[in-house]
């Protein structure tokens, strides 16, 4: 009896579904009326969805040259800097076009991680003096970079190492930290790879104006920030852990060279064992160095090496191309 009841229920189910479907076919107006009575739910938010990025943390690259390694360098920084930092790039039309050709760069622009633009009118990139004028310009910090408070400045001859155990956010207690010039310095450090507190710099620039063709921007700013009441700048010894440029440091977070990787100081680069250790710890630093590959190839491993042309060969019109 129980088995018969289950069979009857199973048999009636498809019949009921068929009748239900016919009702919608034979009486379309009625079916539309039923559908129209189904309550509709609409969600409205008083505020837009929260961004995963912190607008007060900005990593800044300014570069006028459309360098071949510009895109991979920028993407490397985006991978090693904490994920809530936003990135800004200012450059010439040629440099902006080079970045825009990258699918990955455009994806970061679309998700709000990255902004790229030509440098605003009145600001320049043409040489060291122009760079110093830009980085001591009140409008640049107060308006162009707004609402940034923590500013990571990096140049194309600087590198943060992926193998570093340090976190960039660990340095945000300081109003300025860069590459140490002298372990005995109370404050100051190279600005080519530096963290700056924007509000403190604005306080300086609201009261003082840099005279053109005087001190470089990092020297000028740090000498005044160091005297600002309540300012907290990393000293020369502390900065060695942040970035190495002139002074050797064991496993710094990053390195800064100079002049696009052409100025290599002996204290950091002057011995083969130092360079070997650097290649192992921070191999990505090679990305920013102008390297003639012929010098680094072992002839025993590459017998055809003697047929290569050096990039200094007058007959080779394509620097860096080897045949």
Image: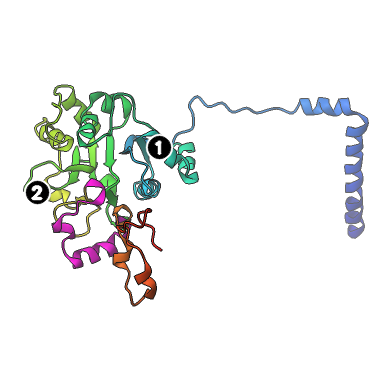
Q: Position of residue 31 (x, y in %)?
A: 85, 29
Mark 2 packing: few (<14 Cα in 10 Å), some, or many (20+)?
some
Q: Is residue 249 visible?
A: no
Where is residue 34 shown, x and y percent of the image?
Answer: 81, 28
Q: Main secondary structure of the magenta part?
A: helix
Quarter of the picture containing the C terminus is bottom left
Label 1, residues with CA under 10 Å away: few <14, some 14-19, many ≥20: some
N-term mark: 2 or 1: 1
Q: Is residue 278 inside the magenta stretch?
A: yes
Compared across the picture, whether 5 is left or right of 47 comes to: right
Front one among 115 and 300:
300
296 sits left or right of 14 in the view:
left
Residue, disc 2? 182
Q: Quadrant of residue 126?
A: top left
Residue at 29% from the left image edge and 54% from the top image edge? 290
Residue linked to disc 1: 94
Q: Residue furthest top?
A: 207
Determine whether 306 is above or below 214 in the image. below
Give above or below for 238 relative to 291: above
In this picture, residue 138 sits left or right of residue 43: left
Give the CA distance from mark 2 to mark 1.
38 Å
| Residue extent of the magenta highlight | 259-285
Q: Residue at the location (34% across, 26% down)?
A: 120
Q: Secondary structure at mark 2?
A: loop
- Residue shown at 17% from the left, 37% from the top: 218
How far across and down, in percent of the image, does residue 221 sit?
A: 15, 33
Q: Secondary structure at mark 1?
A: helix
> Residue 82, which numbered label?
none
Question: Which residue is more in the foreground, 248 or 197?
Answer: 248
Whether residue 115 sits left or right of residue 261 in the image: it is right
> Pointer 2 and pointer 1: residues touching (CB < 8 Å)?
no
């Amino acid at each position: 009896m129980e088995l018969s009841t289950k069979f009857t229920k199973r048999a009636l189910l498809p019949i009921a579904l068929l009748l239900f479907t016919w009702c919608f076919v034979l009486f379309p107006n009625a079916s539309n009326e039923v559908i129209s009575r189904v309550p509709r739910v609409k969600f409205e938010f008083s505020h837009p969805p929260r961004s995963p990025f912190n607008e007060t943390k900005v990593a800044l690259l300014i570069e006028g040259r459309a360098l071949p390694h510009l895109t991979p360098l920028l993407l490397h920084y985006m991978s090693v800097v904490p994920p809530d930092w936003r990135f800004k790039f200012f450059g010439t039309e040629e440099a902006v076009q080079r970045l825009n050709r990258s699918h990955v760069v455009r994806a970061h622009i679309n998700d709000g991680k990255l902004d790229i633009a030509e440098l605003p009118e009145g600001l320049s990139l043409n040489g060291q003096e122009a760079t110093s004028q830009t980085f001591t310009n009140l409008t640049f910090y107060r308006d162009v970079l707004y609402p940034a408070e923590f500013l990571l400045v990096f140049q194309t001859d600087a590198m943060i190492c992926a193998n570093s155990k340090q976190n960039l956010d660990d340095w945000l207690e300081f109003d300025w930290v860069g590459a140490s010039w002298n372990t005995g310095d109370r404050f100051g450090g190279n600005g080519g790879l530096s963290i700056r507190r924007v509000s403190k710099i604005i306080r300086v620039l609201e009261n003082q104006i840099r005279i053109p063709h005087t001190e470089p921007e990092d020297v000028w700013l740090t000498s005044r920030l160091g005297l600002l009441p309540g300012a907290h700048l990393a000293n020369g010894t502390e900065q060695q852990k942040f970035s190495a440029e002139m002074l050797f440091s064991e496993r710094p977070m990053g390195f800064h060279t100079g002049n696009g990787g052409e100025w290599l100081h002996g204290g950091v680069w002057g011995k083969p064992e130092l360079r070997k250790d650097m290649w192992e710890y921070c191999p990505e630093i090679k990305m920013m160095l102008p390297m003639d590959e012929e010098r680094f190839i072992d002839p025993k491993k590459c017998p055809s090496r003697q047929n290569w042309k050096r990039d200094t060969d007058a007959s080779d019109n394509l620097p860096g191309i080897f045949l």
